[in-house]
Every structure is written in C-alpha cells, then in structure tokens.
C-alpha cells in the first residue's frame, strides 16, 4: 500500500523549455485561481463553463462512480484554492509485489485510479488559467537567484512554451509552471508505486505555481512547510537539497520568499 497526494490540475501541453522568468508582463491580463484563460472566444468560454459544470457534477454509481474515482465529484478533491486546483486529500493505492519484486497495481481488480470519464470536463481543464503570481518583493527576486544557483531550476523549469493549438490563448504561449513535467529518480522520496515503465523511485516534477496556497506538500502530504519539503528531496534532487541546507539563514529566507510568491 502506498499513498499519493492529489496534485493540481492546471495544465498545458509542454513542448519546449525556456529561460528563467519572473512571470508575465505587468500589463498582461492575469486570471485569478479557478478562472478561465484570458482571451477566450465566446464559444471557448461557453465550453469552459460547461466543462466546469461537469467537473462539479456529483456522479452516481450508474454513471461510473466506483474504483476509478476517489469521490462523487472531481471538485470534491480538486478545490484548493479554487475549483480545478489542488487538494489536501491523500489517495491510498493498493498493490502487491510479484515474486520478481515488481509492483503490481492490481488493475484487474480496479486498483488503478485511471480516470475513464474525463472527456466531459476536458474543456474545463484545458481552458483553465494557470495560478496567478503573488506579490514579487525584493526578497523574492533575490530568492529566485538562489533557486537557480543551487540547482532547483534544473527540474523545476521556470518557463515552458506550449505547442500549436486551435485555441489562440494556448498557441505557442510561454507559461511558468516551475516544472519540467518529467520523471526523475528521487531515491527514498519515491512512492514505491510502479506504473508502466515508471518504477517506485521515479516521480514527476511537481509544478510550483500556486505552491503558496498549498497546505500540505510532497506526493504524500508529509511536509507542512516548504523547508521540510526541500529537505526531504533525495536521489536526483539530493545535490540541490544539500546546497539549500548549506545556505545561510538569510539566503534560505530569500528562497522561501520566492517560493511564496509563486
């Protein structure tokens, strides 16, 4: 049995990495948590609202509620700090180790939490705006330098660019998730769950946008503070963790100020 923390849904298709950036220009429209992307057409906004209704809809057993769902509504979990966001809920996954030592998620018994009814609210997730940046103070600007200097940005990539999209608001647009969305060997921080080729040590880099609103951190919610979450990094994150621990108290406070601006 292993536990995995529900993560936020805000997403775009990632095709290329960019350079370090503080965020969108000050004159660009900024959507609040849970809002649609700026610049949508009337049809796209209508699809967003219809998808949000599906996301909020309470499902019944006849509609598919069962082992593939964690609750009766997507929004029951993904509502921090707004509908479509993260969650404080920890999902429990069951499985077994085969004689060869491989993790078997027991999908034939409904053990895998594959979302098979996601099409109805795909528009909501696609057109959902990313979390807005918080106030960018001098300490936050200096902290971003520390973030890059000790190696955090190697995996928590500040800026990415979407690919071609029929939605103008998503067509080759720079966005700032602070993640490369790739799997990395995190050593002892891994959740022990094997899915396809991803072993129990491999974890996807969690996006840091909106992290200031999170109340529990890491995949299993074990950390209550950003310092605790950083200190728990292992494997490919160990070097950056060790550099963080060697920072002075003042330098650490700058880096934390930066994270609290995301």
Image (spheres, helix red, strand yellow):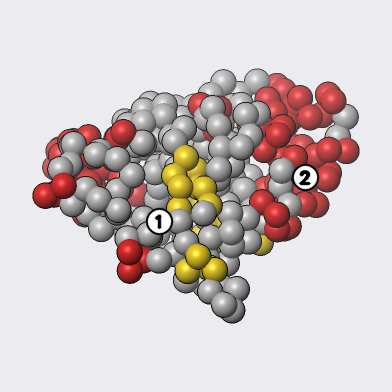
User: Residue, x 75% and y 26% (percent of image)?
Assistant: 254
Viewed as shown, does residue 119 lie left or right of 178? left
Q: Residue at x 51, y 54 (%)?
A: 1
Q: Position of residue 258 (x, y in %)?
A: 66, 29
Q: As drawn, is 121 to the left or to the right of 103?
A: left
| The C terminus - image quarter | top right
Return the disc, 2 or 1, that comes first in the chain's sequence: 1
Q: Secondary structure at mark 1?
A: loop
Q: Which residue is mark 1?
A: 13
Residue 164 vs residue 89, the one in the foreground? 89
The answer to whether residue 199 is left or right of residue 89 is right
Assess disc 2: are there few (<14), some (14-19) or many (≥20) residues with their C-alpha within 10 Å of its C-alpha.
many
In the image, farthest residue toward the bottom:
100
Query: At which x and y percent is residue 113?
Result: 36, 55
Dot 2 falls on a residue whose secondary structure is helix
Q: Position of residue 243 (x, y in %)?
A: 83, 44
Residue 150 visible: no
Viewer-closest of 70 and 172: 70
Name above or below for residue 48 compared with residue 105: above
Q: CA distance from mark 2 to mark 1?
A: 28 Å
Q: Quadrant of residue 60?
A: top left
Query: Nearer the observer, disc 2 or disc 1?
Result: 2
């Amino acid at each position: 049995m292993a536990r995995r923390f529900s993560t936020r849904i805000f997403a775009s298709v990632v095709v290329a990495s960019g350079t370090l950036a503080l965020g969108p220009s000050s004159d660009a429209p900024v959507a609040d948590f849970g809002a649609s992307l700026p610049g949508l057409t009337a049809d796209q906004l209508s699809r967003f609202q219809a998808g949000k209704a599906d996301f909020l809809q309470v499902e019944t057993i006849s509609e598919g509620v069962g082992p593939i769902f964690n609750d009766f509504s997507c929004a029951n979990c993904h509502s921090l700090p707004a509908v479509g966001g993260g969650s404080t809920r920890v999902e429990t996954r069951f499985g077994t180790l085969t004689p060869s030592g491989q993790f078997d998620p027991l999908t034939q018994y409904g053990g895998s939490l594959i979302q098979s009814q996601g099409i109805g609210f795909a528009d909501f997730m696609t057109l959902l705006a990313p979390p807005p940046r918080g106030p960018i103070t001098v300490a936050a600007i200096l902290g971003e330098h520390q973030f890059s200097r000790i190696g955090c940005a190697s995996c928590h990539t500040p800026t990415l660019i979407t690919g071609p999209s029929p939605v103008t608001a998503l067509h080759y647009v720079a966005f700032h998730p602070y993640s490369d969305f790739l799997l990395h060997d995190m050593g002892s921080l891994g959740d022990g769950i094997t899915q396809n080729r991803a072993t129990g040590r491999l974890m996807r880099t969690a996006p840091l946008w909106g992290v200031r609103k999170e109340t529990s951190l890491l995949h299993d919610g074990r950390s209550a503070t950003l310092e605790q979450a950083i200190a728990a990094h292992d494997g490919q994150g160990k070097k950056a963790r060790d550099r963080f621990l060697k920072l002075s108290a003042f330098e650490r406070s700058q880096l934390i100020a930066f994270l609290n601006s995301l």
